[in-house]
Structure formats: structure tokens, C-alpha cells
Amino acid sequence: MSVEDKKMESDNINENQFQGPTDVIYEIPVTVTAVLGRVVMPISQVVKLGRGAIVELNRKVGENIEVHINNKIIARGEIVILDDNKIGITMSEIIKKDLSAVDGIRGNIC
């Protein structure tokens, strides 16, 4: 096999390795978290918590909860009851940030 043939084979492997710049990005796992509410309390109170203790959160019944991806808020929504005794979220507000930096990066990748 000539050097030129080896280079062509190498180029084909590299092209097949990446179908497109976004294909790889769409496969990255992220953690999605629904935040019911928050409270700040001293450790002295935390250590006293036991079975049956009630912790009051900063949200009211029916108020939208936050949806986070990797600890960044991306949406707000309402809790819904699904089949099989599971809960879900109906998205009511998608939080948009300035994506100009991402667009610039995307432009460089493509």
C-alpha cells in the first residue's frame, strides 16, 4: 500500500468518525432536575429532622417549579400526575438566555 493510499484510508476513517458536529453534542448526557422549592436552615435544625418531619419550602401549592439542566435553570412548569403513579412536568415557560456566544462557537465548528 502506498503512502497516498494510506492517507486516503486515514481521511475516510476521520470523515466516518464524525457524522456532523452536532451529532456528537446531542449524545452528551445531562442531568435534568425538577426543583420543588428551597429552604435554608441551620445544621442544628437539620440534625433534628426525623421521619415524619415537615420542611416548609419557599413555594406555594400550584406555583410553577423550576427545571434545571446541570444546575442551570432552563424552564418553569407545573407538576402533573402521570399513569403508573408517576409525576411529570408540563413546561409553561422556557427561559432563554443570550446565545450569541454559543452561536459564535457553533459557527466555528460548522
Image (cartoon, rainbow, N blue to C red):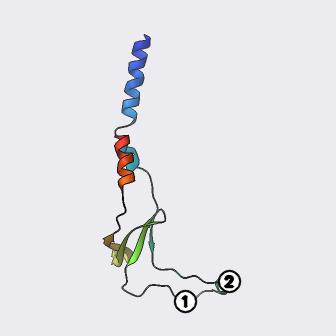
Residue that protrudes farthest toward the top in the picture: 2
Q: Are marks 2 and 1 in contact (CB under 8 Å)?
A: no
- Residue 34 is situated, as x and y percent measured from the top left of the image, at 43, 72
Q: Is residue 87 visible?
A: yes
Q: Residue at x 42, y 18 (%)?
A: 7
Rendering coords of residue 89 (x, y %): 35, 73
For badge 1, the amino acid type reads Ile
Quadrant including the C terminus: top left
- What residue does disc 2 label? 47
Mark 2 is on which residue type? Val
- The mark nearer the N terminus, 2 or 1, is 2
Name the residue: 44% across, 12% down: 3
Tell me residue 59's x, y (percent): 44, 85
Question: Is 103 placed left or right of 73 in the picture?
Answer: left
Residue 50, by quadrant, is bottom right
Q: CA distance from mark 2 to mark 1?
A: 13 Å
Q: Quadrant of the N terminus?
A: top left
Residue that numbered label 1 is attached to = 54
Q: Is residue 80 left or right of residue 59?
A: left
Above or below for 110 versus 53: above
In the rendered image, the vertical position of residue 4 relative to residue 18, given as above or below? above
Total labels drawn: 2
Q: Mark 2: which secondary structure?
A: loop
Q: Nearer the viewer, residue 53 or 57?
A: 57
User: Helix or strand or loop: what does disc 1 sit on?
Assistant: loop
Residue at x 45%, y 58% (from the top left corner): 30
